[in-house]
Image: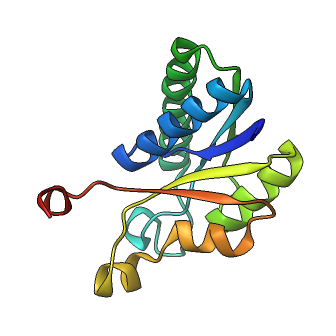
Amino acid sequence: MYQRILVPVDGSETATKAMVTALQMARDSGGQVHLVHVVEGMTPLAADPYGAYSGEVIEIMRQSGSKILEDALEVAKAAGVPADTELFDNFGERLADVVADAATRFKADLIVVGTHGRRGLGRMMLGSGAEQIIRLAPVPVLVIRHSDKKDASA
């Protein structure tokens, strides 16, 4: 079974659902989890007219990412699963590239990622981080889909 599971977390409900799934798998197999958060670039509105971010905005983004990782680590500890965290704040790198590199360095044998399951214009505008991770991942990827209230009744 999977012993070294990498989980990107961003504080969203979907990422949390993926993390809980990964923790259950790790607990069942005696494995460990590596929780990563990628501080990504923001919209041009957060940048100055020349495309740079102010030091304050960058620091707030780092603090937010650190808090997300701290909270995720507490959940892992409560579940009794060995876990560690890593914060990536290299602006300009794509999420999927960072996750794939982290999986290689961690020697992960599985990546568990959440997806919002966007379609149409929402997917075109926002892209699909999960899809990019699947394409670049050096190991299998388990995708946990966001549960949509409409889907529950179907």
Rendered residue at 39%/86% (across/down): 124
Q: Is residue 87 left or right of residue 3?
A: left
Which scheme is used to colour this image of the protein?
rainbow
In front of the other: 91 or 70: 70
**Residue 93 seen anywhere in this rendered image of the structure:** no
The answer to whether residue 67 is above or below residue 112 is above
In front of the other: 44 or 145: 145
The answer to whether residue 120 is above or below residue 82 is below
- Residue 1 picture quarter: top right
Q: Residue 80 at x, y = what percent?
A: 60, 13
The answer to whether residue 102 is above or below residue 121 is above
Rendered residue at 62%/44% (across/down): 7
Considering the image in quadrants, where does the C terminus appear? bottom left
Q: Residue 115 at x, y = what percent?
A: 44, 61
Rendered residue at 54%/75% (across/down): 50
Q: Residue 95 at x, y = what percent?
A: 62, 63
- Residue 34 picture quarter: top right
- Residue 123 picture quarter: bottom left
Rendered residue at 61%/34% (across/down): 25
